[in-house]
Image (cartoon, rainbow, N blue to C red):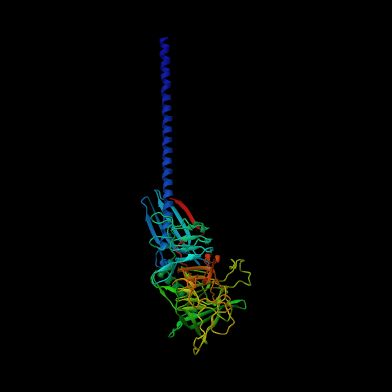
Amino acid sequence: MNCKYKIKLRKAKGYALPLILVAMLILIILSIGESMTSYTTRIQAVSVKAKTEAMLAAEAGYERAIFWMCQQSDILGSLQAGGGSGNIDFGTSTCAYDIGFQGFLGARPVFKISSTGRSGRPVYTRIVDVNVMQETAGWAMGACRVPNGPSSTTEVWFKNGEIVDLPLHINKYNDSPDVRDIWISTSGGAPRFLRKVEMGESRKTSGGTDKYTGVMPCFEDGIHFDQPNTRITDDTAVTSKINRFRDSTAGTYQFTPAAYSGYLPAVQLEFYVSGGAGYVKISNNCRLKVNTPGKYDYCVVPGSGGTLFQKYNIYYYHFRPDSGSVSVPVTNTYVTQQFGGYESEPGGQIYVNGNVVIGSADYGDMVVKGKITVVASGNIWLADSILVDDNGGTQRDADGKPSADNPNVLGLIAQGVVKVVDPGRSPSLAPSMSGYTFARVCNGSSSTSNDRYLPDPIVIEAAITVGGGGFGAEYVGGPNWDYDCGDTQNRKELDGCTDVLIVRGSLTEVVRGVVGMFNSTTGVGYDGYDKNYFIDNRLMTGILPGDIWFTGKYIPAPAGWHDYGIDH
């Protein structure tokens, strides 16, 4: 018995060792598996971290590039000077970005931002390529205020019940105390803003007071606060863009009208359609007489950034030479903008180193057929309605605006002001001038006298840019401006019988210009025009010839964002 037991015990001990070894092997395998899993998890975490950091670094480079672009007075000039590249080191990641010119979308410049973010070892790379364009504005203002002194402005209100059917942008005014930069009258029916509104200022004061809480319902498409300022108040931006426009204009259509003692130099333009083609009659070396300004006839003092103002003398009448006027097809003025080896679509360009008067008693309403931009280093005076051709009404929407397929467009850009002339300035006593003919510019009357009569309504279909002040009407509220109701000669009227000014297009101005105002002299009625401004949606796509945009904001082009990663 004892021997057998000992034998069995030895056999039992002989089985235990292999079992222990197997168990140890299993534990080792499990431990290695757990270690591998932990290592893999750590590797994955490191990889995800590197990818995330590279992506964020690339996007940070894109944001830095956009910020740089927004700071430039003239992005094309800055790129030509070699700007637009940079690097950022975040410690565990880096990025390198570059800004270049990508081409034209129609007449609109397109830029390319390439930003490469890197992180990790091995390095993970993330690349962001974005095509961006300068945002276009419907109605952009350096300040929503009217000058009323050399260094002072007064608020201008959006009226009760007024409808503003344009995207709106207003620069930050930097006032103290900080009040709302847009003035709204809500008594008797608030105005309605149908499109997006951008404000340069914040919604709240530094003390936390909400400046907009009482008027937010007026903004049906909301407000975007803290937006970049438009560059229309930047003299460098205006000058550089206008100089580039001048240099790209055909020499035949660059004009410097001759000065003459007691008169301003000017060019008269008359647009019309004949035989299905668009024409412009150009009368160079006109002699323009000015008259006493009214209360609100201010322009910006050059170099002041839109903070200092001076009176300017308003349009009175002008003479044009008996010979030398030429009528040319609008297409004769066509050129292409060129940059970085790319060409834009062709469009007409006329540059005047002086003043421009648009109007004629010979053709009826001015009608523009073709694409053309007129730039003046001085003022542009409008003395008639100006319409784009609508192909017999087939290229005009039911609301009166040019339809999307209408190819005709007019741009008006002035380093001075753009103004509708005062209809109360009667030049009947204008002297005769040898070799020159008095130029009747308005067609509102069949009278053969020199008196000026404007149509009612006046319709301006154009993209208007005012680098030296605001768009509006001259001598509003002056003693000769208004006449009694029943005036059949279509001058402006008193006692509430205002005429109508319709703008179908876009508007960019340093400050607001007066269009109409309550008659404080008589206590009744309203002097000037009731304004009706409507966005021409075609202009938002940048079909206007010439690189004349002043918004300080850049947005991705349609389908313009591309990003991808690279493992090394």
* Pick the front one: 561 or 418: 418
In this view of the protein, which residue sits in the foreground, 189 or 522? 522
Q: Is residue 224 visible?
A: yes
Residue placed furthest toward the front: 523
| Residue under the image location 43 percent in, 32 percent down | 30
| Percent of width and height locating residue 232 | 44, 68
In which image quadrant can residue 416 be found? bottom left
Name the residue rendered at 48%, 65% in the picture. Answer: 157
Foreground pick, 494 / 47: 494
**Quadrant assignment, res 307:** bottom left
Residue 119 screen position, x and y as percent:
40, 50
Residue 352 placement (x, y as % from top left): 47, 78
What residue occupies the far top of the structure in this picture? 1
Question: For this rendering, which residue is in front, 113 or 70?
Answer: 70
On the question of residue 124 being in view, the answer is: no
Residue found at the very far bottom of the displayed protein? 434
**Quadrant including the N terminus:** top left
Residue found 41% across the figure and 10% down from its top: 2
Whether residue 93 sits left or right of residue 137 in the image: it is left
